[in-house]
Image (spheres, grey):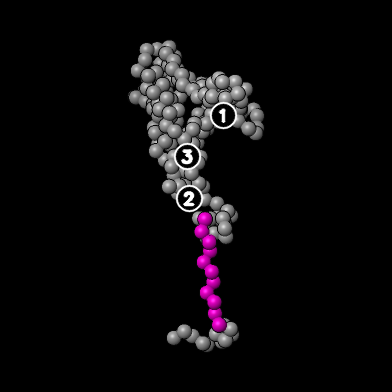
Amino acid sequence: MAVQGFEVPGFSLQSKENSLRCTVNRGVINMAVFRKDQRGAPAVRITFDQSHAAYVQLLDAIGEVIKAPLNSKQSCGRHRFDPTTKRFIDLWNITIEKDSEMVYKITLTDIEHGGASATFTFRAVGGVFGGADPSNKSKDSLLGIKTFVNWLKMADGMRALSYEKFDPNNRRGGGNGGNGGSAPAAASVAPAVASDPDDLPF
């Protein structure tokens, strides 16, 4: 059941050129890349459906890359069937990579909307670092990708709570506080009582 006013915390990554924002809205995990030198619509849009398939795919890809040797990659993606052409059309692709320095990266490609792509390096945020050496890039990156995994698990667990945001101005059917119900009718008072302030009910 949706909880009005509840919003799942987001996750973000930054690069020199782009900003990645991961959010949950109406039960769906969304990822959007915004160019720092542009405004308006995102350059890359990836939307998971309400099933667990894409979520499980991504977690599996991350787990395999973490256990794999250096210079390893794993990809996952989504497609849909076009009944007109009788073919599958690719929608998006996500690639998880571990480079030669054991640094983890994610590349998101929006195939459906033109094929734009962006790559981000996982790093720990908020001044937190992995291990005793803050200059250790590999431990720092491992902590960053594990933080992303934790967010994915949290987001998936809270998807059902995000189906509807509370909007006090959206009073459906004259509702009470936007919950879809009707406001209670005012109690009727006899004219004689209403005009006599001393006519108390006791």
Name the residue that disc number 1 marks.
Answer: 45
Figure quadrant of residue 194: bottom right
Residue 20 at x, y percent in the picture:
53, 29
Name the residue that disc number 3 marks.
Answer: 27
**Over which residues does the magenta segment extend?**
180-190
Whether 187 is drawn above or below 73: the answer is: below
Name the residue that disc number 2 marks.
Answer: 4
Q: CA distance from mark 1 to mark 3?
A: 16 Å
Q: Nearer the viewer, mark 2 or mark 3?
A: 3
- Identified by mark 2, the residue type is Gln
Q: Nearer the viewer, mark 1 or mark 3?
A: 3
Which residue is rendered at x = 51% and y = 22% of the image? 93
Of callouts 2 and 3, which one flags the residue occurring earlier in the amino acid sequence? 2
* Crowd band around label 2 with a 10 angstrom C-alpha radius: few (<14), some (14–19), many (20+): some
Q: How many marks?
A: 3
Q: On the rendered structure, is 85 left or right of 58?
A: right
- Answer yes or no: is residue 161 visible: yes
Of callouts 1 and 2, which one flags the residue occurring earlier in the amino acid sequence? 2
